[in-house]
Image: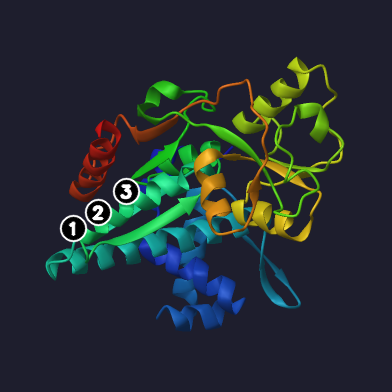
Amino acid sequence: MLPQLNSIISRLRLRHFRLLMALDDCRSLMKAAEQVSLTQPGATRALQEIESALGAELFIRTNRGLEPTELGSCAIRYARLITTDLAHLREDMVSILQGHEGRLTIGVIMGAVPQLTDTLSRLLEKRPSLSVQIVEDTSGRLLHLLDDGRLDLAICRTSVSDHPRLYEAVNIREEQLAIVANVDHPLAKVKKLVLADLSSYRWVVYSANMPMRLLLEREFHEANLQFPSNLVETTSAFATLSLLQRNRSMVALLSIDAAHFCTRFGITSVLPLELHSRSEPYYLVTRRDRRLSPIATLFIEEVMMSVNN
């Protein structure tokens, strides 16, 4: 049985994480000890402390040197994440001391990317020294990153969470959806379509149980049509657009904002099909139990100004 979190926190030190990364790089206790400026007995003792604190054997000796166990590989991965976070901490502190704006990390689902980039562009005009990281992913994944403190905020949906009360969620836009395809799709020039016209084509869709996938399945069900089985499943916007570009017979469901953006640049065509189901809105999501940074607060103000106008 693994130790409790409080026990692990009280026993592990930053030097332990440095040793884990060195052991992964060197696969030799002697070389790892040199890399972190320890004697070999000191490195041996430190590794014993790590394994004792985590309650598991992390390395095994082989003829190729020390090899991490599955739990060891997990520990090494988090050691690197913790070290990276400390590097970001220092970068942010240096940036603030030098009079810069700091760093903002935002999560966003694919359909809300156009709205995010509009808002962010306005903010960057006002705060030109601001550093920004944008993470595009599914709502579920973004909420996990928000829970872990790796995002300041996210534009996504909280309905996918088992614990939606953990979040402060503000409705910022009603999502409209569109069916898109290659500009040379056989039905691209037709004036009006019904869903049955597209049932035989290959669809690029989100994975099962995701909101947009569920909406599309509901559309097929209400039209008394069998949901297609020859699907390509992806959560990647770039993969979706690339597939549509290379395959003239494929179709996909996108937010109307993303669809219009792609159409404006001749990437895809919006097919003339009206959907009956309404999609869940986009929400600006933060954790209720977290204090926002000043720059995150400024971003939220910028979003709300856009919504209210």
Which quadrant holds residue 187?
A: top right
Q: Is mark 2 on a helix, strand or loop?
A: helix
Instruction: Decide if residue 301 is on the left or right side of residue 176.
Output: left
What's the amino acid at mark 1? Lys
Determine which residue is flagged by label 3.
119
Q: What residue type is labelled 2?
A: Leu
| Residue 266 x/y as whole percent | 60, 58
Tags 3 and 2 in contact by the CB under 8 Å rule?
yes
Q: Can residue 137 be seen in this view?
A: no
Viewer-closest of 152 and 76: 152
Q: In the image, is 47 to the left or to the right of 89?
A: right
User: Label 3 vs label 2: CA separation?
Assistant: 6 Å
In the image, residue 111 sits, relative to residue 243, either above or below, namely above
Label 2–label 1 contact, CB within 8 A: yes
Residue to which mark 2 is pinned: 123
| Residue position for label 1 | 126
Q: Residues within 10 Å of mark 3 (few under 14, many from 20)?
A: some
Q: Which residue is drawn at 17% across and 66% down?
A: 100
Mark-to-mark CA distance, 2 and 1: 5 Å
| Place of residue 35 in the rendered image (x, y in percent of width and height, measured from the top left) | 46, 82
Quadrant of the image containing the C terminus: top left
Quadrant assignment for the N terminus = top right
